[in-house]
Image (cartoon, grey):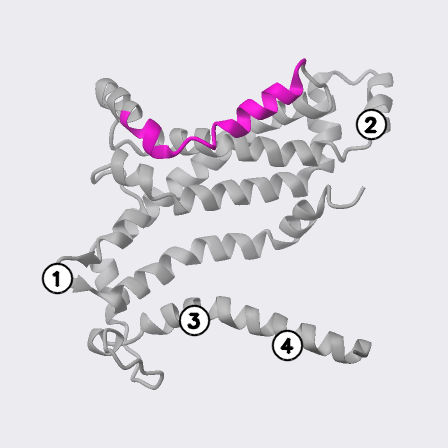
Amino acid sequence: MSAPLKNMLVNILTWALVLIFFFPVFWMFINGFKPESVASSINPKVLFTPVTDGYQLAMDRGMAGYLQNSLTASVTATIISVVIAIPAAYALSIRRVKAVEGALSFFISTRFMPLAAVVLPLFMILKTVGLLDNIYMLAIVYGAVNLPVTVWMMRSFFLEVPYEIIEAARVDGAGLYREIVRIVLPLVLPGIAAAALISFIFAWNEYFLSLLLTSSAARTTPPFLGSFVDGRGQFLAVLSAAATIAALPVIIAGWVAQKQLVRGLSMGAIK
């Protein structure tokens, strides 16, 4: 097989896979502009008269408040995980603590346990101290859950910092604070942006903890989306409209940080 033909087949396969994975998102988007009778029809229709009833109904059911809760919890959880992960990753990479392999194994092992195994004691603790249905406590839980992944990602970025630069800074008399803030962090900023975006996405999409640890005041968007499927049936038009709105913050965050995300995720790929 010639090289041009092989490249053409690879391009065709790539575009086919892109279209296959993108089609459900596209179908969700156009369903949000269909009347409910058309969206729920057994025979799917591509040509229809667009309406905004689904978006209006989603907002009438208080979606703005759920979006605000999701934004508060996700941003707060991201800040918590990033702020704690920076010194942890620094200690596990540049100024290594003893038994670093054991510490790394402990961090990642906390992600192996299913959330269903820990949610009951967590629920009882929060109920005892009166912090159920609290958005900031939910953010702390999100930050703790995302912390192991954030530490592992940041450690791989910190390992890419040339040690000669750090040694030169120490020779010039740089202390620990200056070494981290003025020398190391600017070099790994794309990696930090990538880790922060991943943490934000995980927190934004989290469903299980929000469903069980909140009831009304602190409930976030994912459980709200689930409320459109009940005993009366599936309300596909309004659900598609609400899901489209819920996806926009993540899409916007990814678009704004795309350069840092690409650079950060490529760090450590090539030595």
N-term mark: 2 or 3 = 3
Residue range highlighted in magenta: 98-120
Residue 207: image quadrant is top left
**Magenta region, mostly helix, strand or loop?**
helix
Image coordinates of residue 94 in percent, x first then y, are 73, 23
- Marks 1 and 3 sit apart, C-alpha to C-alpha, by 26 Å
Contact (Cβ within 8 Å) of mark 1 with mark 3: no
Image coordinates of residue 129 in percent, x first then y, are 25, 18
N-term mark: 1 or 3 = 3
Q: Which mark is residue 65?
A: none
**Nearer the observer, 42 or 268:** 42
> Dot 1: what SS?
loop
Crowdedness near tag 3: few (<14), some (14–19) or many (≥20) residues, C-alpha within 10 Å? few
Residue holding disc 3: 26
Name the quadrant of the N terminus.
bottom right
- Marks 1 and 2 sit apart, C-alpha to C-alpha, by 63 Å
Residue 264: image quadrant is top right
Q: Is residue 50 above or below residue 167?
A: below
- Marks 2 and 4 sit apart, C-alpha to C-alpha, by 44 Å
Residue holding disc 2: 163
Residue holding disc 1: 232
> Which is in the foreground here, disc 4 or disc 1?
4
N-term mark: 1 or 2 = 2
N-term mark: 3 or 4 = 4
Q: Is residue 182 above or below residue 96?
A: below
Residue holding disc 4: 12
Crowdedness near tag 2: few (<14), some (14–19) or many (≥20) residues, C-alpha within 10 Å? few
